[in-house]
Structure formats: structure tokens, C-alpha cells
Image (cartoon, rainbow, N blue to C red):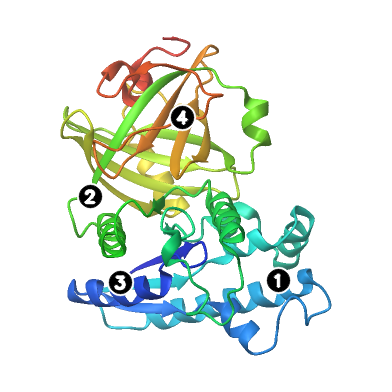
């Protein structure tokens, strides 16, 4: 069977998706991948006369669009499974969760019921998500409606949609936001680099900073549209002293995804990371290799997007006055901006005391 990865390229209007898709095909083909692109569904439907304003209601339109989108992706996956290529990348020009940005909560709930899917199943059915920030945020002079006949948004509407797309995908285990801090060529290079890291074609370094924070207001976090709560259970496997190998169940039973992560520490900020998804059966088999000296880690993770940053806030049952906030960065020099509601005690990047593996090695019931 070929190695198949399915990713989403999303973003606000005029974020550069069209150019990015062409660059992805060229760059990844040179790395030996067969690249398959699932075309955007909404543009095809609206251009063909099927739109929210021509259907009976927006909800009925979304049922049509999301059903068609799901079927297209399944066909591409089926075709990919028959190909002789060793490495196949399926690139979705927008994914199912993008549609949430165009619906009320009630409409989205009704569409999920119609599809027989949960939000987590829909969101986490992709291996990685790459969001290209709209030009309306930081590159306004390049914002245009001319290259897409289905686009109609003003700059302000584009910014609002961009936020909604990020909110819809918040909670995915591999979400990367590519902003407009460089020129457009630099933006495309950044995207290709991030995809290459994900695929393991470049040294898959994780640039991570970690902060000890006051225990956050969970009611506040739960109220945010740009925040998702995810239960996590993880076990550490037997490994060498300079290596961490863990398996993780992410999400509630019946909706969980399972991953294997191998991590080697390469400095204060850098970790060399390899990660792959597991079937539930593989996860159960690897549990037999769990290190008996390490206890299970159980935590609640809040995934929070704020000003183009993706925070992961971990709450541990043994702590009632503090928590850990982590953020992955594109470089060590990238500044970190916290929401004012989160009170930072101090940075603990590189402090072994606050590594999950060290917490797992403490006796059950131990606190700080």
C-alpha cells in the first residue's frame, strides 16, 4: 500500500491558495510525491448556479456542498489506494470544516446530524491543516476580487471570514497558520517548508516555547469561539535516556485519534519529532510496551488561536493553581503575544521539571 497523506489548504479570501496549490504540486513532485488536488467544491457549485441564495435555504445548500465534498475526497482516497506510487499527497482545496464559517451553530449542528458525523470526526479526518492568512490582514494593497468570480467579500468581511476559518479548524492536532509577515514569495516558501516538515522531508523540528501560567478560567475558555477543549490520555514507552516515545489518545471515546510520537531533544527550543497516526488496534498493541516506571498522563487540553498564534493549554488533574501553555513557532525569534486573560508566571522552556515525561515519572498524586 502506498503512503497516503491528506492535507487541507485553507485560508481567508485572497490568501494565495491558487498560487499555493501550483507551488505544492511542483515542489512535492520533485520530492517524489504523486500530488492529487481535490478542487474547491463551493466555487464549482456557485459558478454552476447552485448557491445558498438559489437553494431552499443556506442549510440545504450546505448539505449539498458538504455531501459532494465528502464524496470527492473519498473518490480521491480510493483512487490513491490503487496507485503504484510509494508516496501520495492528497491536497484538499478547503476542507469540510471551512463550511462552518458560513453557518449558524444550529445550521452546523443540523448538517452534522444529516451527515451522521461529529465535529471532531469531521475536523480530525485530515492529517494536517495549513491556513493562509488573507491579504486583508497585513497585505491590504494586494487584496483583490478579480481572480475569483465567486469572491465578493470586502476587506473587513475577508478579515472576519479569515478569523472564522481559523476558529473552525482550532482543535486540530496539526494546524499551522502562514501569515503575511514576508512578501508573497516568502509566504509560499514558508508554506512549502511547513508541509515538508509535516511529511518528514525536512528535519522535522518542533520549535516550541513553554510557559507556566495561572490556572485559567475554564468558563472563559469554553465560551470562546476560537477555542476547543480536547481530552488527552498518553503513555510513555520504553526508550533511550535522550529519547521520548509516547502514544496518545486524543479525543473522547468513539471520536478519538491515536498517534505515536518519537521525540529527541536538540536544544532549549528545538525537538526532533517524528509522528504518525495509529489505528486503535495498533495503539492497544503498543500499550504492551508502556514503561512501567512511568504513569499515564491524563490532561485536558484547550487549543486556542489568538492573533495568528496557536496555543495549547494543558490542565492536569493534580494541579489546581497553575497550568502549562505551549506554542510552536516558525523561528526562535518569533514574538509571543498572550491574551490578557492568561496570566504568565514565567517561561519554563527547557526546564525539565515541566516536561510531560517528568510529570509522568512522579508518584501518582504528586503535585508541583
Instruction: Give the labeled residue for mark 3.
Output: 24
On the image, the x and y values in percent for residue 217 come to: 62, 22
Cβ atoms under marks 1 and 4 closer than 8 Å: no
Cβ atoms under marks 1 and 2 closer than 8 Å: no
Q: Which mark is residue 338?
A: 4
Mark 1: few, some, or many residues within 10 Å (few <14, many ≥20)? many
On the image, the x and y values in percent for residue 96 come to: 58, 65
Marks 4 and 3, how far apart at CA: 32 Å
Marks 3 and 1, how far apart at CA: 28 Å
User: SS at mark 1?
Assistant: helix
When asked about the image quadrant of residue 2, the answer is bottom left
Left or right? Give the position of 242 relative to 171: left
Marks 4 and 2, how far apart at CA: 26 Å
Q: Quadrant of the C terminus?
A: top left
Q: Residue furthest front?
A: 141
| Residue at x 35% of width, y 43% of height | 286
Can you say whether 306 is above or below 130 in the image? above
Left or right? Give the position of 224 relative to 265: right
Marks 1 and 4, how far apart at CA: 35 Å
Instruction: Give the labeled residue for mark 2.
Output: 204
Q: Is residue 124 visible?
A: yes
Amino acid at each position: 500500500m502506498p503512503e497516503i497523506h491528506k492535507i487541507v489548504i485553507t485560508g481567508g479570501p485572497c490568501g494565495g491558495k491558487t498560487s499555493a496549490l501550483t507551488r505544492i504540486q511542483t515542489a512535492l513532485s520533485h520530492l517524489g510525491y504523486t500530488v492529487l488536488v481535490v478542487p474547491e467544491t463551493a466555487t464549482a457549485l456557485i459558478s454552476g448556479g447552485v448557491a445558498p441564495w438559489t437553494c431552499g435555504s443556506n442549510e440545504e445548500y450546505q448539505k449539498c456542498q458538504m455531501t459532494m465534498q465528502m464524496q470527492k475526497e473519498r473518490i480521491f482516497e480510493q483512487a490513491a489506494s490503487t496507485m503504484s506510487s510509494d508516496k501520495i499527497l492528497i491536497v484538499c482545496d478547503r476542507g469540510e470544516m471551512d463550511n462552518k464559517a458560513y453557518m449558524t451553530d444550529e445550521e452546523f449542528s443540523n448538517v452534522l446530524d444529516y451527515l451522521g458525523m461529529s465535529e471532531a470526526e469531521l475536523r480530525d479526518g485530515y492529517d494536517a491543516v495549513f491556513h493562509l492568512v488573507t491579504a486583508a490582514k497585513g497585505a491590504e494593497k494586494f487584496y483583490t476580487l478579480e481572480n475569483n468570480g465567486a469572491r465578493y467579500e470586502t476587506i473587513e468581511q475577508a478579515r472576519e471570514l479569515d478569523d472564522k476559518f481559523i476558529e473552525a479548524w482550532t482543535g486540530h492536532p496539526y494546524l499551522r497558520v502562514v501569515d503575511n509577515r514576508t512578501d508573497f514569495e516568502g509566504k509560499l516558501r514558508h508554506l512549502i517548508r511547513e508541509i515538508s516538515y509535516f511529511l518528514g522531508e525536512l528535519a522535522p523540528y518542533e520549535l516550541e516555547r513553554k510557559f507556566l501560567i495561572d490556572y485559567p478560567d475554564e468558563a472563559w475558555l469554553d465560551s470562546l469561539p476560537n477555542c476547543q477543549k480536547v481530552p488527552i490520555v498518553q503513555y510513555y514507552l520504553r526508550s533511550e535516556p535522550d529519547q521520548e516515545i509516547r502514544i496518545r489518545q486524543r479525543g473522547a471515546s468513539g471520536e478519538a485519534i491515536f498517534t505515536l510520537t518519537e521525540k529527541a531533544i536538540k536544544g532549549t527550543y528545538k525537538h526532533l519529532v517524528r509522528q504518525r497516526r495509529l489505528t486503535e488496534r495498533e495503539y492497544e498493541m503498543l500499550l504492551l510496551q508502556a514503561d512501567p516506571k512511568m504513569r499515564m498522563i491524563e490532561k485536558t487540553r484547550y487549543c486556542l488561536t489568538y492573533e495568528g498564534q496557536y496555543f495549547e493549554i494543558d490542565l492536569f488533574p493534580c494541579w489546581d493553581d497553575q497550568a502549562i501553555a505551549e506554542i510552536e513557532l516558525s523561528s526562535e525569534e518569533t514574538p509571543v503575544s498572550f491574551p490578557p486573560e492568561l496570566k504568565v508566571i514565567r517561561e519554563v522552556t527547557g526546564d525539565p521539571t515541566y516536561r510531560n515525561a517528568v510529570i509522568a515519572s512522579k508518584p501518582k498524586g504528586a503535585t508541583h
